[in-house]
Structure formats: C-alpha cells, structure tokens
Image (cartoon, helix red, strand yellow):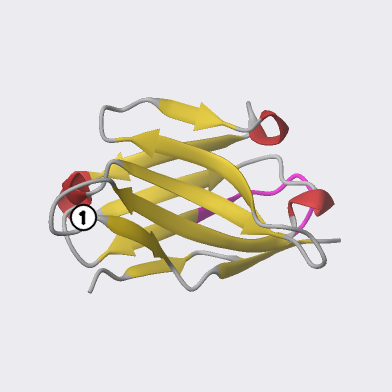
Amino acid sequence: QVQLVESGGGLVQPGGSLRLSCVASESIFSFHVMGWYRQAPGKQRELVAHVTSGGIINYEDFVKGRFTISRDHAKNTVYLQMNSLKPEDTAVYYCKADSFSGVRQGVYWGQGTQVTVSS
C-alpha cells in the first residue's frame, strides 16, 4: 500500500515562509502526477500545484510567484516551498499522488499538515 507522509506545517506570521515535504513509501517515478492540495475550514479541498512525471508544473493563480513545487527522486520526496504567506493560505495541506496505470494504479492521499498564517 502506497503511503504519503507530509510534514513541515506550522504557525507562521504573514509574509513568512514554510517548506512542506511529502515523502512517498516508494519511488515517485511510480506516479504520473504528484501535487499539493489544501482545505480551509468550511471550504472544499482545492489544488495548489502539481508536477507531472514529465516535469510539467502547474500552479493555481492564487499561489503563482509565491509557492514552488519541486521533487527529489533520490529521497522519494515532493516539496512545496511557500513564501510571502498570507492569512488566507491557512489550511490543511495534503499531498496527492496519481498513478494512471500499472500495479500502482490509483489515487493516494497523505494525512495532511496544518499551516496557520497569523500574527
């Protein structure tokens, strides 16, 4: 069973930075897409950014220029560097991995990590 474990959340002041990590239990080459989502209280879960196995990256407009998604294949890890954080970025951040074929076909989610932006 594939496991994704997020870490790096916490409390930060507006304008501050955090780096989230998502460690997969197996090689991230197994996944066609890996991404970060977030869910604020009372709101639906939404995409933040994702990266395909071919290296194509997409950011939602509300994080463009502030967040950066990256991968370290040797560490089976996907990162989300978050800069210039705003109170509206407060949410639980989830890592997601999609595999469209093969023995690992499916959608996998981590347990989430809380990010709170507040003074």
**Image quadrant containing the N terminus:** bottom left
Amino acid at pointer 1: Lys
Q: Can you give x and y, in whole percent of width and height, for residue 96 in the image?
A: 43, 56
Image-based side of 58 in relation to 55, left or right: right
Question: Which image quarter: residue 83?
Answer: top right
Q: Is residue 23 above or below residue 85?
A: below
Q: Is residue 107 above or below residue 54?
A: below
Of residues 106 and 17, the one nearer the viewer is 106
* x 53%, y 69%: residue: 112
Of residues 116 and 100, the one nearer the viewer is 100
Question: Which image quarter: residue 55?
Answer: top left
Q: Can you give x and y, in whole percent of width and height, for residue 75 in the image?
A: 21, 55
Q: Secondary structure at mark 1?
A: helix
Q: Is residue 15 magenta?
A: yes
Instruction: Give the magenta part as a residue range.
Output: 11-19
* x 27%, y 45%: residue: 100
Q: Is residue 111 magenta?
A: no
Image-based side of 80 in relation to 18, left or right: left
Image-based side of 63 in relation to 103, left or right: right
Residue assigned mark 1: 75
Judge the density around disc 1: few (<14), some (14-19), many (≥20) Cα neighbours within 10 Å.
some
Q: Is residue 87 above or below residue 108?
A: above
Q: Can you give x and y, in whole percent of width and height, for residue 65 in the image?
A: 63, 26
* x 58%, y 60%: residue: 93
Q: Is residue 21 above or below residue 16?
A: below
